[in-house]
Image (cartoon, helix red, strand yellow):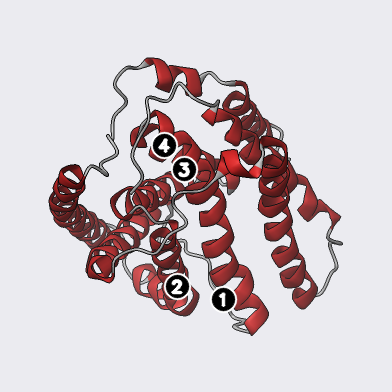
Amino acid sequence: MSKGTDGRNENGNSCMYVAAAALVMALFLPKLIPADAPAPAVTDSGILIQLCSLCIPAAVYSAFAGFPSVKNETIRTFPISRSVLLLVFCAALLTGSVSLSCMLSSGSAGLQEFSDRSFATFLCYVLIPAAVEELAFRGLMYSRLEKTGAFNAVFFTSLLFAMYHFDLRMFPVYLLSGVILGLCVYVTGSVFASVLVHFLYNLFIFFFSRQLNEFLGYMSGPSLAVVTAVLSVVSLLLLALAFGECRHILRGTAESGEYVPFFPSTAESFLRDLFSLPFLACVVIFIASVLFNI
């Protein structure tokens, strides 16, 4: 894990312009797809939209900022000994997101189902989101925002990640996902850790979302509430277990001099990022999309 700085060097929040551009492209590019386009064409277009909306802004930002100044210290492998911890995070993400989905939906988990399991669909909904979204949010943006403290990085990348999906009803689910994925990067110091957890989560949903929806759809009233409560408790217990292991890992990184403080030393850096132009632009774009149903 990279050693933190005092955050006074470089304007780290400028990386959020990448998110603002991604939001605009993700909002308007799908409108170029004809309404009567066949399903394979829609899937192929979805792949291109994901790649364009995140890769192009990230590449432009890197070019203008200068590649040396955006050197990404999270592009590294993570110790294999932390694989079990990542599986715990993945299980916490799955149980937590399903329980939240049950609370936000009526009669089922409300998870997206996949009748077409072609390779193109797999790329569009499993592999590319896990790779591209993580490299953009938990790679480029996280590494820049971490200069003012890991809390800032986790907080803002989670919010931007949730806004990027333009789903107000499922916003808490995406926010929880962003927090857990951000913590994966913080503990391991590697964006590949969050890529792996994101991929495993997407893979599970890809193959088992229909069964989950059907199982929870059979339940109603008290029984559904009990299952939701059990899933919530299991998710919290898994997170507690993960945090216990995290403390042990972070104690070791502190001894080796590689510790990155989670909370900033002052609130100044957080407020500076919170009221920065790029972050406010992202908020305005998201709220406008909700209010005007863009």
- Type of amino acid at the residue the image marks with label 3: Ser
Residue at the spot x=60%, y=30% of the render? Answer: 14
Front residue (pair 205, 243): 243
What secondary structure is found at the residue carrying circle 1?
Answer: loop
Residue marked by disc 1? 114
Question: How many angstroms separate mark 3 from mark 2 (CA)?
Answer: 32 Å
Q: Which mark is residue 143?
A: 3
**Mark 3 Cα-neighbour bin, 10 Å: few <14, some 14–19, many ≥20:** many
On the image, the x and y values in percent for residue 19 come to 62, 40
- Type of amino acid at the residue the image marks with label 4: Glu
Q: Are marks 4 and 3 in contact (CB under 8 Å)?
A: yes
Task: Give the label, 3 or 1, closer to the camera.
Answer: 3
**Mark 1 Cα-neighbour bin, 10 Å: few <14, some 14–19, many ≥20:** some
Residue marked by disc 4? 146
- Is residue 14 rendered to the left or right of residue 59? left
**Is residue 284 shown above or below 249?**
above
Residue at the spot x=64%, y=27% of the render? Answer: 281
What secondary structure is found at the residue carrying circle 3?
Answer: helix
- Type of amino acid at the residue the image marks with label 1: Phe
**Mark 2 Cα-neighbour bin, 10 Å: few <14, some 14–19, many ≥20:** many
Q: Are marks 2 and 1 in contact (CB under 8 Å)?
A: yes
User: Mark 4 or 2 closer to N-term?
Assistant: 4
On the image, the x and y values in percent for residue 173 come to 42, 50
Q: Are marks 4 and 2 in contact (CB under 8 Å)?
A: no
User: Mark 1 or 4 closer to N-term?
Assistant: 1
Task: Give the label, 1 or 4, closer to the camera.
Answer: 4
Question: How many angstroms separate mark 1 from mark 4 (CA)?
Answer: 36 Å
Question: How many angstroms separate mark 4 from mark 2 (CA)?
Answer: 34 Å
Q: Which mark is residue 231?
A: none
